[in-house]
Image (cartoon, helix red, strand yellow):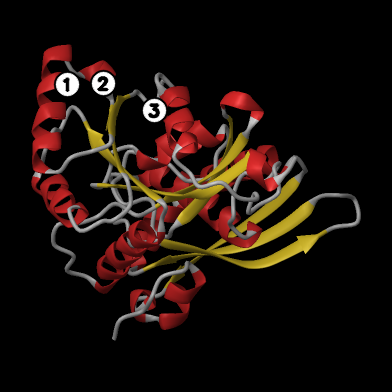
Amino acid sequence: MTASATHAGFVAIVGAPNAGKSTLVNAMVGSKVSIVSPKVQTTRMRVIGIAMADLPGGARAQVILVDTPGIFRVAKRRLERAMVAAAWQGAEDADLVALVVDAERGIGQETRAIVERLKESKAPRFLILNKIDLVPREALLSLTSDLNALVPFERTFMVSALKQDGIADVLTALAARLPAGPFLYPEDQAADLPLRLLAAEVTREQVFLQLHQELPYEAAVETDKWEDRADGSVRIEQTIHVQRDGQRAIFLGKGGARIKQIGARARHELGQMLERPVHLFLHVKVSERWADNPAHYRAIGLDYEP
């Protein structure tokens, strides 16, 4: 296929925490590339998902989706500031910007602040109202009008990312606005995330799903060892960093039951994603100041601000 018959470019997916950005990206890619949980701020780094789309006339497009961390209105902690910086950097570097808004929550302070910042964006802007199955149609039309009055969007889409309703239309529209050029990744690649990081993210998702009411989101997971074994399986050793002894006890659970459950579910998820047997070993460590460690920020693609 010649370059003229192909299109490729980056689309930054921005929005307030818990707007459904990761669910949307996973739905467009057609496989899991970003972690999802009910807890806000589960996405910390810029995760790149790669979706393919057919265009009229036989052309094809590679839509490179940058799932950014949710943008706080006021970022107080160092980690939060680094996440916000990563989100805006992703938006500034992209060919297109798509704002995802939780239609049920409407225009909160965080979304309003993001819209103000988007006024400075030179890239074409798209608006995606998510979770429309939870909102009356009249409210959706009013929300669309209010947001476009704040900053004009090229197109507005109404979707339910969780139910994959309206996703195909969004992907096609984004693909049609990308510049002509060769694909930037192999056609069968779904994400640009090192396997060690992907494995850590999968375990961190299970941490949130199992403990989302009991543990602050600062908990971190690092992949310490990755061993491809002769029988085709992989052995993965990971450390879960918490900040206090009490949190370590919560993680372990009575008789180690909680950590075993987290490990079993993460192992199953990884096995499906990697399509090979996984041997996963988890260790919980109290690391009071990991959030001040520059190496941790570099490992997940964030800039460390002193």
Residue 26: horizontal and vertical position, in percent? 49, 37
Quadrant of residue 140 within the rendered picture: top left
Between residue 252 and residue 145, name the one nearer to us: 145
Q: Amino acid at mark 1?
A: Leu
Farthest bottom residue in view: 306
Q: Tell whether label 2 touches label 1 (CB within 8 Å).
A: yes
**Which residue position holds label 2?**
132
Disc assigned to residue 140: 1
Q: Which residue is mark 3?
A: 161
Q: CA distance from mark 1 to mark 2?
A: 7 Å
Q: Which amino acid is tagged 3?
A: Ala
Q: What is the C-alpha distance between the residues marked 2 and 3?
A: 9 Å
Q: Which residue type carries mark 2?
A: Ile
Task: Kindly tell me whether residue 34 is visible in this rendering.
Answer: yes
Q: Is residue 103 above or below residue 216?
A: above
Q: Which of marks 3 and 2 precedes in the sequence?
A: 2
Proximity of marks 1 and 3: CB atoms separated by less than 8 Å: no
Q: CA distance from mark 1 to mark 3?
A: 16 Å
* Residue appearing at x 58%, y 38% in the figure: 61
Between 20 and 211, the one nearer to me in the picture:
20
Q: Nearer the viewer, mark 1 or mark 2?
A: 1
Q: Is residue 188 left or right of residue 294?
A: right
Circles 2, 3 touching at the beta carbon (< 8 Å): no
Residue 60 position in % (x across, y down): 62, 35
Check disc 1: other Cα within 10 Å, few if <14, some if 14-19, many if 20+: some
The vertical placement of 164 against 49, above or below, is above
